[in-house]
Structure formats: C-alpha cells, structure tokens
Image (spheres, rainbow, N blue to C red):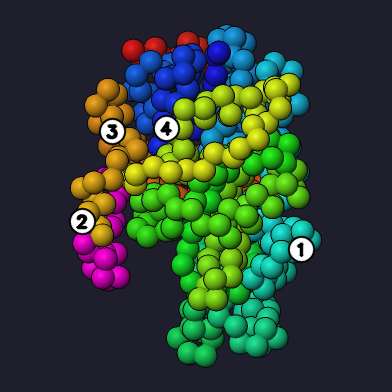
Amino acid sequence: MNILLTGGRAPVTLELARLLRRAGDQVFVGDSIRGHLCRLAKGVTSVSYAAPAGPSGSSSEFVRDIVEIIERHDIELVIPTCEEIFHLAEARETIEQHCPIFCADAGTMDRLHNKYSFAEYVRELGRSVPLTNRLRESDDPDTIVDEVEQWYEASGETPFVLKPAYTRFGADVCLFPRGLDDPADRRRLANVADDHSFAAKAPWLVQQFVFGQHFCSFAIARGGKMLACATYPVTFRAGHSAVLFESVRHQPIEQWTEDFVRKSNCHGFIAFDFVVDDQAVVWPIECNPRLTSGIHLLADEPNLRDVIVQAATSSNEPPADETIYADCPPRSIKAALCLYGLGQAGISGRFWKWAKMSLLSKDVIFRWTDPLPALGQFATLFTFWRIARRNRISLTEATTFDIEYSPGEGENEPRRSEGREEVNHREHRGHREKEEV
C-alpha cells in the first residue's frame, strides 16, 4: 500500500514509517523543512511540500502540494502526524476526493486542540476537570491582571496556570503554584500581561494548578472504539515534553481514555495529559488529537499496522474485540535524555534512575539496521536552531514554527516575528522527492 506520512521531522513519524515499511508498505514521508529526520530512513521516499504556517507559509499552497504528491505517487492513504494535521483536517473533503486521510473533521480537531473548549467538552461528558476560565481578549495589561485576580479570589485563592488556548510543548505556559500571595508572583503576572506578544497569543485561559504525578496516554480509535492504548509517566523532559517512555498499566487512566473515546465517538490518533493527585483522582489537563510518543511503546505489537490501516481506511472489517495495551521495555529519545535529564535528575534525586535509563532504554531513533536517521538528527536539530535564532524563539517553539495552527490567523501572518524560517518554499517544487534506499 502506498502511504504518505506528513511531519517527517518528528521521531514519532520515523517510528510509524519503520512500522509500515516492515509490514511491506511503500512509505512516503514529507515535510516543509529541508533535512527532516525521516529523509535518511531506510526504504522511505522523502517528499517536500510548502509550509502551511509561519511568515512565508500558505495553507492553501500546502494542500495543493499534498494533492500533487498523492496524484504523482498513487497514494492510497494519508496519515498526518504533527500539527499540520489541523491544516489538513480543514481540507479533509479535498483530500478524500483522492484517498482516505486518518484524522477527524476540523470542528472536532479544533474542539480538542483548544485547551478551553476541551475542558468544557470534558465537563459536558460528565467528567471532572480543573477549574478553567477563558480570559476576555484585551490589549490592556491592567484589564488582564484584574480579571486574573478576580478569578483567583473567586476560586478561593487557588494556585493556577496561565496559558494560551493554543499552545504546544508547554510554550508560553506560566505556572503560579503559590497563587498570588507573594508580591513577586503578582509582579510576574503583571510582566506577563505587559509582554508585547500577549495579545497576539490570545485567547488565554486561567486554570487551576493541580499538584500530583504527570502521565500521558495515547490511543488509536475507530468509531468510538479504543483499539490500542499506551500510558506512561512523565519523569524526564525536554522543556515540557517527555523524553523517557516507560509503559505502565494505569487502570483509572485507561478507563478514562476508553470512556472519552466511546462518548465522543473518537476516530484517529488521540492523546491526553493527566495529573493524578494524592487522592488518586485523575485530572485531564489537555488533549492532543494526533500522533504522540505513545506510539513508541506500541510499535512492536505485531498487529498494530493492520489496526492503524483498517481504522484509517474505514475498513468493513469490524474492530478487534480486544484492545492492545502497551507492554514493552523503556524507550527514550536518548540524546535528549542525556542532555536534559542529568540536571533534572540532580534536582529531583533521581540520578540513578536517569543513569540506568540512559544506558538501558532503547533509543527511538537509532537502529543498527537503519542507523542514518540517528546521524541525521543533528542536522535536523541544527535546522531548528537556525529557525529559533532567526525568529528569537525557543528551540522547542522552532520545531513547530512553520506548521502551527491557531484559528483566526490569516495566511502568511506570523505569530511572533517577521523573520524567515528555514523551510522549503515554492521555488523548490518540481521534482522534489528523493528515493532513499
């Protein structure tokens, strides 16, 4: 089967590409940056397309490129993996004129991606969520501070988080675990509201800060049936993203995920961030309706390819009766674990765990049978470093700079800077695919 994966920059895409290739599929992987992670993967055909966002991005041009790739290579299935999935969801009807695409409709995707509407939706489904309030959009810092302070007092001086409704990797998230009792925290709130980019990142929300252990879950769903699930605690991070993946069986989280999938009639990849408090209450924090790192813990399951393809193509075959649950040794993005984990291990007193996992966990990028992506990851990292430097943003923000999705922004309207990102532009079209053996 000819399958197109978008988002070739991500380790999760590399994992999925290898999984499909092992099953005998012809895998095409695309991205809008030069030097994406999957371009050197064994047996994968690398293709390019226009960036859907960023200063030089164009969602319509991006969709045209995807259609052109589908027609040129007789693609039978499109599986988006990163944030470009939201741009493709808006063009779902156009794509489906040529082949199936594995994602929900744009309205559903936006409701789950928006952190405020997700919290409201969970509440509508009868589940508890942290106290959440959407702030009114305003250019006046004093108005913003007043509204946050009013919420803080009305909530009984609850510790809180201030964050945009659309954010990724924890970017722009401001934590106030002590509330506003300390004058230093009130000054910090005023500085956040006074930042010149605050209004551009609206809408913002204020949400109750929940103390406890962080977990992530990832599921594959078809028509409200959870077909596979992986759950893992968040121990070591790069920014706010986990870099160590240890599969656990956490029954309350698994039940919560399955219940949400059923009640929402979920279809596609879906993932959640949770906090489990000291009373063992599961609190959903946000939703990522796309491929996430849980795929690393499921990739060795022998039937996973068929599960994904049958779900994506709306096969007439009934869903499997049994849900696949991840049960495998630890995985990690080893370079990130070594780079970021040591400092965290020293602070949290988990040095020996860090040392053990750095040695024994299986790297999700390196394979003896397919070693080139592990070498190429440093070129990919350099590309993101250049984007971050040119646009004065963090390295993690740079990884999604040209694919970010925030409704209401016009094409070619930059979110943070007028700088140019390191992406492939229209002049690089033509025959832009390269066969990698």
In this rendered view, identify the residue nearer to me: 64 or 347.
Answer: 347
Dot 3: element = loop
In the picture of the structure, the residue carrying the numbered disc 3 is 366
Q: Residue at x 41, y 25 (%)?
A: 18
| Amino acid at dot 2 | Ala
Dot 4: element = loop
| Amino acid at dot 3 | Phe
Mark 3 or mark 4, whichever is nearer to me: 4
Mark 2 or mark 3, whichever is nearer to me: 2
Q: Considering only vertical position in the picture, is 396 above or below 317?
A: below
Report, in whole angstroms, how far the alpha carbon at label 4 lies from the one at label 1.
35 Å
Could you tell which of marks 2 and 1 lies nearer the N-terminus? 1
Q: Considering only vertical position in the picture, is 433 above or below 339?
A: above
Disc 2 residue crowd, few under 14, some 14–19, many 20+, Cα 10 Å = some
In the picture of the structure, the residue carrying the numbered disc 2 is 355
In the picture of the structure, the residue carrying the numbered disc 4 is 300
Q: Is residue 343 magenta?
A: yes
Q: Residue at x 58, y 66 (%)?
A: 282
Q: Which mark is residue 126?
A: 1
Could you tell which of marks 3 and 1 lies nearer the N-terminus? 1
